[in-house]
Amino acid sequence: MDQNEMKRQAAEAALEYVEVGTYIGVGTGSTANLFIDALATVKGKIEGTVASSVATAERLKSHGIPVFELNEVDGLSVYVDGADEANPNLQLIKGGGGALTREKIVAAASKRFICIADDTKLVDVLGTFPLPIEVIPMARSFIAREIVKLGGDPYLREGFTTDNGNLILDVHGLHINQPDVLEGTLNNIPGIVTNGIFSKQRAEVGLFGSTDGLKVLKPYEH
Ligand code: 5RP
């Protein structure tokens, strides 16, 4: 089974969490795209979706799945999205596709966050994947210097502008032992729009495709 099939396994398993007659949030990336394809088979069950990026909105619409602005709906029953890294507590690094700000907003507006990925994304400690940070363009150099003080090695994502008109710094060399703390510290640097640590918005359920079958993580269920 290749990596794409493992992603598909997770994406299709997420259909179980789609609640009839509700609005759902949809993430961005190759795994989220496979979820959209699966969602198309049950699209009559839901009222509609809120997309976390322009690309996701276009893919949803191409399947005839209704897409709404977040401002048009009262709330979302569930958010389904991939991740670049996930630790055993389902704290995540996201933003490899540069959609982290809208992803964090839609996740926060949803009752539950279901993370879908292949099991190569599972790690003990976050930080091997460079941490994406969305920044206001005029603050880019200032923020880069502040990140160096925190022990990171920031690189500008060349030729990339987010859906919000901002830039991405990819920060290498972080060993994120306390995701909650670093997420908050970064949020306090003026000019950072969003950082890719999803700790406050961590996932509730993790569905990880693997060659041995689907791995389901529910660290908060007893
Ligand atoms: C996009 C993201 C994606 O969820 C993350 O990059 C994982 O993508 P993929 O499913 O293609 O591996 O955060 O901003």
Image (spheres, grey):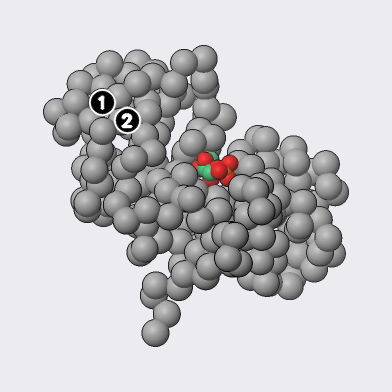
Quadrant location, the C terminus: bottom left
Mark 1 crowd level (few <14, some 14–19, many ≥20, 10 Å Cα): some
Left or right: where 194 falls relative to 13: left
Residue corresponding to mark 2: 171
Q: Residue at x 48, y 50 (%)?
A: 120
- The local secondary structure at tag 2 comes to strand
Q: Residue at x 66, y 66 (%)?
A: 13
Q: Identify the mark nearer the N-term, 2 or 1.
A: 1
Residue corresponding to mark 1: 153
Observer-nearest residue: 209 or 22? Answer: 209
Observer-nearest residue: 140 or 157? Answer: 157
What kind of residue is marked 2?
A: Val
Residue 211: x %, y % from top left: 59, 60
Q: Is residue 26 visible?
A: no
Residue 215 higher or lower than 60, as above or below: below
Q: Residue at x 17, y 32 (%)?
A: 151
Which corner quadrant of the image does residue 54 belong to? top right
Q: Mark 2–mark 1 contact, CB under 8 Å? A: yes
- The local secondary structure at tag 1 comes to strand
Observer-nearest residue: 173 or 202? Answer: 173
